[in-house]
Amino acid sequence: MLSITKKADYAVRIIAFLANTPPESYVSSTEVSKKTLVPRKFLARIVLDLIHAGWIESNRGSKGGIRLSKNASEATLSKVVELVDGPIALNDCCSPNSKCAFRKVCKIHPVWVSAQAEMRKVLDNCYIVKEARKK
Protein backbone atom coordinates (compact mmCIF):
# COMPACT_ATOMS: atom_id res chain seq x y z
CA MET A 1 0.00 0.00 0.00
CA LEU A 2 1.28 3.43 -0.93
CA SER A 3 0.63 6.09 1.68
CA ILE A 4 2.00 9.24 3.25
CA THR A 5 3.35 9.05 6.78
CA LYS A 6 1.24 9.67 9.86
CA LYS A 7 3.33 12.78 10.49
CA ALA A 8 2.38 14.27 7.09
CA ASP A 9 -1.27 13.35 7.62
CA TYR A 10 -1.20 15.03 11.04
CA ALA A 11 0.46 18.17 9.63
CA VAL A 12 -2.29 18.47 7.00
CA ARG A 13 -4.97 17.96 9.68
CA ILE A 14 -3.45 20.67 11.88
CA ILE A 15 -3.30 23.24 9.08
CA ALA A 16 -6.80 22.39 7.85
CA PHE A 17 -8.20 22.66 11.38
CA LEU A 18 -6.55 26.03 11.99
CA ALA A 19 -7.86 27.24 8.62
CA ASN A 20 -11.37 26.78 10.01
CA THR A 21 -10.74 28.96 13.07
CA PRO A 22 -10.89 32.76 13.21
CA PRO A 23 -7.58 34.09 11.79
CA GLU A 24 -6.88 36.39 14.74
CA SER A 25 -7.48 33.70 17.40
CA TYR A 26 -4.87 31.47 18.96
CA VAL A 27 -5.97 27.90 19.68
CA SER A 28 -4.50 25.88 22.54
CA SER A 29 -2.47 22.81 21.72
CA THR A 30 -4.86 20.78 23.85
CA GLU A 31 -7.81 21.83 21.70
CA VAL A 32 -5.93 21.23 18.45
CA SER A 33 -4.92 17.79 19.69
CA LYS A 34 -8.49 16.88 20.66
CA LYS A 35 -10.11 18.19 17.47
CA THR A 36 -7.55 16.70 15.06
CA LEU A 37 -6.86 13.48 17.01
CA VAL A 38 -3.13 14.22 16.87
CA PRO A 39 -1.38 13.02 20.04
CA ARG A 40 -0.04 16.04 22.02
CA LYS A 41 3.56 14.81 22.06
CA PHE A 42 3.52 14.38 18.30
CA LEU A 43 1.65 17.66 17.84
CA ALA A 44 4.46 19.65 19.47
CA ARG A 45 7.06 18.25 17.06
CA ILE A 46 4.91 18.85 14.00
CA VAL A 47 3.94 22.37 15.08
CA LEU A 48 7.63 23.19 15.44
CA ASP A 49 8.22 22.13 11.82
CA LEU A 50 5.23 24.21 10.70
CA ILE A 51 6.50 27.23 12.66
CA HIS A 52 9.93 26.93 11.03
CA ALA A 53 8.22 26.72 7.62
CA GLY A 54 6.39 29.96 8.43
CA TRP A 55 2.88 28.51 8.26
CA ILE A 56 2.04 28.63 11.96
CA GLU A 57 2.63 31.26 14.65
CA SER A 58 2.71 30.52 18.36
CA ASN A 59 2.13 32.67 21.40
CA ARG A 60 2.75 31.79 25.04
CA GLY A 61 0.59 32.72 27.97
CA SER A 62 -3.00 32.29 29.13
CA LYS A 63 -4.41 33.46 25.79
CA GLY A 64 -1.66 31.79 23.83
CA GLY A 65 -1.63 28.84 21.48
CA ILE A 66 -1.12 28.47 17.77
CA ARG A 67 -2.69 29.96 14.66
CA LEU A 68 -2.01 30.10 10.97
CA SER A 69 0.39 32.73 9.74
CA LYS A 70 -0.22 34.82 6.66
CA ASN A 71 2.13 32.52 4.72
CA ALA A 72 -0.16 29.55 5.34
CA SER A 73 -2.12 30.42 2.21
CA GLU A 74 0.88 29.01 0.32
CA ALA A 75 0.61 25.63 2.02
CA THR A 76 -0.17 23.04 -0.64
CA LEU A 77 -0.53 19.35 0.10
CA SER A 78 2.77 18.73 -1.69
CA LYS A 79 4.65 21.36 0.35
CA VAL A 80 3.34 20.05 3.66
CA VAL A 81 4.07 16.42 2.80
CA GLU A 82 7.58 17.30 1.62
CA LEU A 83 8.21 19.42 4.71
CA VAL A 84 7.68 16.45 7.01
CA ASP A 85 8.41 13.46 4.74
CA GLY A 86 10.95 14.76 2.24
CA PRO A 87 10.60 14.46 -1.54
CA ILE A 88 7.45 12.79 -2.83
CA ALA A 89 8.09 9.70 -4.90
CA LEU A 90 5.53 7.21 -6.13
CA ASN A 91 8.19 4.51 -5.94
CA ASP A 92 11.96 4.27 -5.60
CA CYS A 93 12.73 4.67 -9.31
CA CYS A 94 10.92 8.04 -9.31
CA SER A 95 12.82 9.43 -6.35
CA PRO A 96 15.33 12.20 -7.11
CA ASN A 97 18.34 10.15 -5.95
CA SER A 98 17.27 6.82 -7.41
CA LYS A 99 20.03 4.40 -8.29
CA CYS A 100 17.72 1.93 -10.02
CA ALA A 101 19.80 -0.27 -12.32
CA PHE A 102 16.85 -0.82 -14.66
CA ARG A 103 15.82 2.82 -15.05
CA LYS A 104 17.08 3.23 -18.64
CA VAL A 105 15.74 -0.08 -19.97
CA CYS A 106 12.59 -0.53 -17.93
CA LYS A 107 9.41 -0.39 -20.02
CA ILE A 108 7.33 0.51 -16.95
CA HIS A 109 9.50 3.44 -15.81
CA PRO A 110 7.73 5.98 -18.10
CA VAL A 111 4.39 4.86 -16.63
CA TRP A 112 5.65 5.48 -13.07
CA VAL A 113 7.02 8.88 -14.11
CA SER A 114 3.71 9.83 -15.72
CA ALA A 115 1.69 8.64 -12.70
CA GLN A 116 4.01 10.57 -10.39
CA ALA A 117 3.62 13.73 -12.48
CA GLU A 118 -0.19 13.46 -12.30
CA MET A 119 -0.13 12.83 -8.55
CA ARG A 120 2.24 15.76 -8.11
CA LYS A 121 -0.03 18.02 -10.14
CA VAL A 122 -2.98 17.21 -7.87
CA LEU A 123 -0.97 17.76 -4.67
CA ASP A 124 0.61 20.98 -5.99
CA ASN A 125 -2.81 22.43 -6.84
CA CYS A 126 -4.50 21.73 -3.49
CA TYR A 127 -4.02 24.73 -1.21
CA ILE A 128 -5.02 23.45 2.23
CA VAL A 129 -6.17 26.77 3.67
CA LYS A 130 -8.30 27.69 0.66
CA GLU A 131 -9.79 24.20 0.53
CA ALA A 132 -10.65 24.26 4.24
CA ARG A 133 -12.15 27.76 4.12
CA LYS A 134 -14.37 26.88 1.12
CA LYS A 135 -16.57 24.66 3.32
Image (cartoon, rainbow, N blue to C red):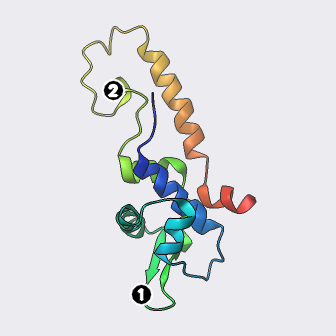
Local packing at callout 2 (Cα closer than 10 Å; few below 14, some 14-19, many 20+) is few
Q: In the rendering, which numbered label is found on residue 96?
A: none
Give the side of residue 62 with respect to residue 19, left or right.
left
Q: In the rendering, which numbered label is found on residue 92?
A: 2
Q: Amino acid at mark 2?
A: Asp
Q: Quadrant of the C terminus?
A: bottom right
| Residue 49 appears in view | yes
The percent position of residue 127, horizontal first and vertical second, equals 61, 54
Q: Amino acid at mark 1?
A: Arg
Local packing at callout 1 (Cα closer than 10 Å; few below 14, some 14-19, many 20+) is few
Q: Nearer the viewer, residue 16 or 39?
A: 39
Gap between marks 2 and 1, in whole Å? 42 Å
Q: Nearer the viewer, mark 2 or mark 1?
A: 1
Question: Residue at point 44% right, 69% down?
Answer: 54
Q: In the rendering, which numbered label is found on residue 60?
A: 1
Question: Residue at point 66% right, 67% down?
Answer: 20
Q: Earlier in the sequence, mark 2 or mark 1?
A: 1
The percent position of residue 99, horizontal first and vertical second, equals 24, 24
Q: Quadrant of the N terminus?
A: top left
Give the side of residue 88 with respect to residue 132, left or right.
left
Helix, strand or loop for disc 2: helix
Helix, strand or loop for disc 1: loop
The percent position of residue 30, horizontal first and vertical second, equals 48, 74
Q: Is residue 53 above or below residue 83?
A: below
Question: Residue at point 70% right, 63% down?
Answer: 133
Q: Is residue 60 above or below residue 103?
A: below
Q: Nearer the viewer, residue 44 or 112?
A: 44
